[in-house]
Amino acid sequence: MTEYRQKLCTPEEAVEVVKSGDWVDYTSSLGKPVLLDKALAKRRDELFDVKIRGNLVEGPIEVAECDETQEHFVYHTWHCSAYERKLCDRGLCYYIPMVFHNNAAYYKYFLNVNVVMVSVSPMDKHGYFNYSVNTGVAGPIVQNADVVIVEVNEHMPKIHGGYGECIHVSEVDYIVEGKHEPFTTGKPYVPSEIDRKIAQNLLPYICDGATLQLGIGSMPNALGELIAETDRKDLGMHTELCSDAYLHLYKAGKLTNKKKTIDRGKGVFGVAIGSSELYEWLDDNHGVAAYPLEYVNRPDVIAQIDNMVSINSCVSVDLYGQVSSESFGARQISGTGGQLDFLIGASSARGGKAFICMSSTYKDKSGQLFSRVLPQFNGDIITSPRSQVYFLATEYGVINMEGRSTWERAEGLISIAHPDFRDELIKEAEKRKIWRRSNKR
């Protein structure tokens, strides 16, 4: 406590360490340093070209909002939250492509961190601050920072970890305290009828004792709710992102982690985003363990988990099997994240399966219907190459792309496209000489 008091200062005092030209990291999600962000924004006119990195951060981000000229502050993200997506649309945020299992290596070998500012839970009696639901990314960033500032957030849940979940007071340069608003429960993801149909199509592939990786959104939550209603038992969790879908499974008695081949008895995750009830469940829970993404997302770790089932989503796919999961055209809407990590890892596991899911269609603002199965991408950002895409699912079925030729891929993809678009897709496949059947069938 003596060392704690020596390092305690106001947010305004702490941000004085930032210099023009610095790289500053805000880490991820709930790790956003709310008080320090506001204090740094107040220094706008005396600083120039300060570059900030974040990830899945909810707004407002004061340093981005206060300087539309970007002469003083420039904000970056390596996975867009809904708020960061809007910043990108306004030209106030730049995306950093990143495969998540390389997160630690990027910071160790390639990225400068002059100052890191991270929210942590209150210090325990042994002098440790907990990175909480930010464990997946915080540790590697902090380890490579020149200056470490922690912002104590009284609402942060304390999460037990495998490693890298804490920092000791002796490793901290400045400590900031202050009042924080409680974390709000966002608008719940309400599964649509299509989400439920897709989830229903996936159920036959999930056996007792399977370990699940579920992304965020309405479809994974639909799957969690559906599995909770089935007779599946002894399921496990090994996931980059822990969401309320796992809480549904736990409350239904399905999530026991008893059959996992590694980390048995522990639900493993990197980052958690969800409801206040989810954070309450994770708090001081010895049944879960947070790890850095260099462990959670490493394909050779995932491959050790028998019956590993990975379920991610995408925006669109073309007839060659290329997948776009992070953009509409050139518009960045999310990020690469861990999709490639889990595609490779889960498909390498004994009994493992990797799924990418989407609705077969979408509507634009005018109500016009479009197919998510496209003839060929033209300018879209490819997240997953065709050589590493395995199972694809829509509300019309599931296909396996492993080892399939171009015409087999086209046939399979058209079979799970919306019926209204299949004839046109057949014609487009014929033009590209990847179709064997007659389009008059």
Image: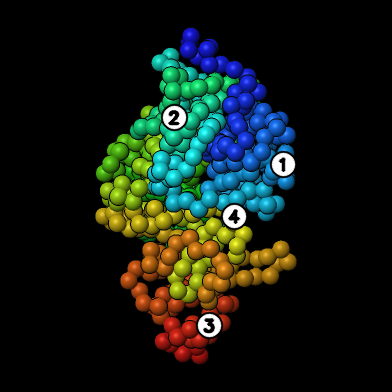
What amino acid is found at the position of numbered circle 3 in the picture?
Glu
The residue indicated by pointer 2 is 159
Q: Nearer the viewer, mark 1 or mark 2?
A: 1
Label 3 – label 4 distance at C-alpha: 28 Å
Which label's residue is closer to the chain start, 3 or 2?
2
Residue that label 4 marks = 333
Mark 2 nearby-residue class (10 Å; few <14, some 14–19, many ≥20): many
Between marks 4 and 2 in the image, the one whose residue lies nearer the viewer = 4
Say above or below: 95 vs 114: below
Q: Are marks 1 and 2 in contact (CB under 8 Å)?
A: no
Residue 398 vs residue 390, the one in the foreground = 390
Report crowding for label 1: few under 14, some 14 to 19, many 20 or more residues within 10 A (C-alpha): some
Q: Residue at x 72, y 39 (%)?
A: 66
Q: CA distance from mark 1 to mark 2?
A: 35 Å
Q: Earlier in the sequence, mark 3 or mark 4?
A: 4
Q: Position of residue 394 (x, y in %)?
A: 49, 65
- Of callouts 1 and 2, the N-terminal one: 1
Residue 155 position within the rendered picture, expressed as x and y whole percent measured from the top left: 56, 26
Disc 4 to disc 2, C-alpha distance: 29 Å
Which residue is painted at 30% across and 38% down in the image?
Answer: 263
Dot 3 falls on a residue whose secondary structure is: helix
Instruction: Tell me how far mark 3 sits from mark 2, CA to CA.
Output: 51 Å
